Amino acid sequence: MSNNQTRVKLSACRGPVDLTPYGIPHPDPFVCSMRVDAELLNPALPHVSNIEYVRWLDGSAELHSDSLGYTRRGLIAQGMLWFVARHEIDYCAEAWEGDEIVVVTWVRDFSRVRSWRDYVIVRPADETVICRAATLWVLVDLNTRRPLRVPAEMIDAFRPLVAPRGREQEADSPGVDSPCTLR
């Protein structure tokens, strides 16, 4: 378990969770939950600090990956690791100490070296959507620090919402649509 998971105390949900009120498009998303503790609150206001949401996104993605056999340790041993290229977060409501929070995540799609993952963070007690987010992940070769083609078996394991296009048809060259690359 990473330090991130220890701090936020996320755990995979064991029983069924009714996701109907939230419009989750994936037929079988990964679902985890936690209880908000005082240590997660913003010191200036008694609500969850925005940085904690990013930790929840990262932690839920890691738990999902672990559940499929793609642990951080295993990926590193294979010389690869997923790196965050972009987060998009819409904060919809506040979370408070004592709230039971559910984080729902699924892989939207894969391209040659990238993957979009979507998230919805909810408070089931009152069916409130706390946050909607998406993260663009890039699979990186740890030796070269260059993007690495996502193995077909990994794509199959994650069951993306959108089936991958033929690999030869993709135009996913480095620098295309990247706000971090000088042209």
Image: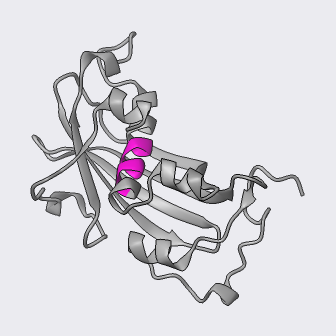
Q: Where does the C terminus fall, quadrant-wise?
A: bottom right
Q: Which residue is drawn at 76% across and 66% down?
A: 176
Return the residue nearer the eye: 96 or 5.
5
Decide which of 99, 9 is in the foreground and name it: 9
Residue 129 is at least partly visible in this image:
yes
Front position in the image: 30 or 150: 150
What is the quadrant of the N terminus in the image?
top left
Residue 140 vs residue 55: left or right?
A: right
In the picture shown, does residue 108 fall above or below 81? below
| Name of the residue lying farthest toward the top | 44
Residue occupying the far right of the picture: 183
Q: Position of residue 79 (x, y in %)?
A: 64, 56
Q: Please report the residue visible at 57 percent of the width from the left and 53 percent of the height from the top.
A: 77
Give the overall secondary structure of the magenta segment.
helix
Whether 176 is drawn above or below 164: the answer is above
Q: Nearer the viewer, residue 122 or 156?
A: 156
Q: In this view, does 81 lie above or below 160?
A: above
The residue positioned 39% from the left and 24% from the top of the image is 49
**Which stretch appears magenta?**
57-64
Residue 53 is inside the magenta segment: no
Q: Where is residue 132 in the image (x, y as percent from the top left)?
A: 38, 50
The image position of residue 18, as x and y in percent, is 11, 58
Image coords of residue 62 (percent x, y): 41, 49
What residue is rendered at 38% in x and 17% in y?
42
**Residue with the most extreme front position:** 77
Q: Quadrant of residue 118?
A: bottom left
Q: How many labels does the image show?
A: 0
Q: How is the image coloured?
A: one colour
User: In this view of the protein, can residue 161 be seen by the observer?
Assistant: no
Picture quadrant of residue 174: bottom right
Q: Indicate left or right for 99 with 174 as reference.
A: left
